[in-house]
Image (cartoon, rainbow, N blue to C red):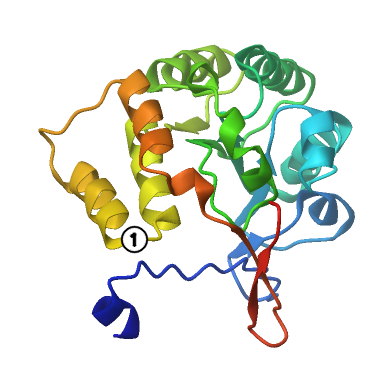
């Protein structure tokens, strides 16, 4: 109610870690899953980036071997894997290599449960490590539905039970970034109107320019003290 009166956008984020023995679905760090016995139908993990270097840099230091060990363990336990990925940061060639790696792993380890690979394009919220890189956005790195359809066709040649989650369009990502990073009513109204009006279509170049022109990328980075709830601005970020 306070945010509504003040014209602010409110977003509540939760990084759930579910490890209830009675739950059919576990949300886990993949490296924990590799080393932890699990009795569940589905295990959901955030792989997020395509290369070991990117994952290490951005807080998920898992190796390609960890992914293969997770696949082997999931086959032994009869677990379906749902893995989440953030595209738009790594090069497209890195994602092509990543998908080819999965094809190779599925040849080496036949897998009979559902493998669900979700892909979504990067949003630079100001509470993520990548917010520092916000002015290095490169629209050419964002993937499209054509990419995920092609990857689906490729992976289906190696495993019959594969699903691919398609990404948001670049315009949608820009609108979400604009809404979440808005500091003024004018900024918020501009980006919200772009999200709700289907006739307001932006080209990739126009959406990219609008991010710069509306000034939302100048929003200071925030840091949350999870014990007290205090939010502080990180100077110089």
Identify the residue under disc 1. Answer: 184
> Which quadrant of the structure image shows residue 9?
bottom left
Residue at position x 71%, y 78% in the image: 225
User: x%, y% of residue 216?
Assistant: 43, 47
In the displayed structure image, the side of residue 231 where residue 144 appears, left or right: left
On the question of residue 100 being in view, the answer is yes
Residue at position x 57%, y 55% in the image: 126
In the displayed structure image, the side of residue 10 where residue 78 appears, left or right: right
In the displayed structure image, the side of residue 193 where residue 130 appears, left or right: right
Q: Quadrant of the N terminus?
A: bottom left
> Which quadrant of the structure image shows residue 69?
top right
User: x%, y% of residue 100?
Assistant: 68, 14
Indicate whether 34 appears above or below 68. Answer: below
Q: Most extreme residue toward the left, as rendered?
A: 199
Q: Secondary structure at mark 1?
A: loop
Residue at position x 71%, y 26% in the image: 110
Residue at position x 62%, y 52% in the image: 44
On the question of residue 79 being in view, the answer is no
User: x%, y% of residue 8?
Assistant: 34, 70
Q: Nearest the camera: 63 or 38?
A: 63
């Amino acid at each position: 109610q306070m945010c509504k009166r003040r014209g602010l956008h409110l977003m509540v984020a939760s990084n759930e870690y579910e490890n209830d023995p009675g739950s059919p679905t576990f949300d886990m760090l993949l490296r924990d899953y590799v080393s932890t016995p699990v009795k569940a139908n589905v295990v959901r993990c955030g792989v997020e980036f395509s290369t070991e270097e990117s994952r290490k840099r951005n807080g998920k230091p898992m190796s390609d071997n960890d992914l293969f060990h997770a696949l082997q363990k999931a086959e032994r336990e009869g677990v379906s894997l749902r893995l989440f990925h953030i595209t738009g940061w790594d090069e497209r060639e890195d994602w092509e290599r990543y998908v080819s790696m999965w094809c190779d792993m599925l040849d080496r380890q036949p897998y009979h449960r559902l493998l669900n690979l979700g892909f979504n394009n990067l949003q630079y919220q100001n509470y993520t490590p990548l917010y520092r890189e916000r002015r290095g956005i490169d629209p050419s790195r964002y993937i499209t539905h054509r990419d995920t359809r092609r990857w689906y066709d490729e992976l289906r040649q190696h495993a019959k039970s594969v699903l691919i989650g398609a990404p948001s369009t670049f315009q949608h990502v820009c609108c979400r970034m604009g809404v979440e990073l808005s500091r003024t009513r004018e900024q918020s109204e501009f980006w919200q109107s772009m999200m709700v009006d289907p006739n307001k279509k932006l080209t990739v170049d126009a959406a990219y320019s609008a991010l710069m022109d509306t000034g939302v990328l100048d929003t200071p980075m925030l840091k949350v003290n999870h014990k007290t709830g205090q939010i502080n601005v990180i100077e110089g970020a």
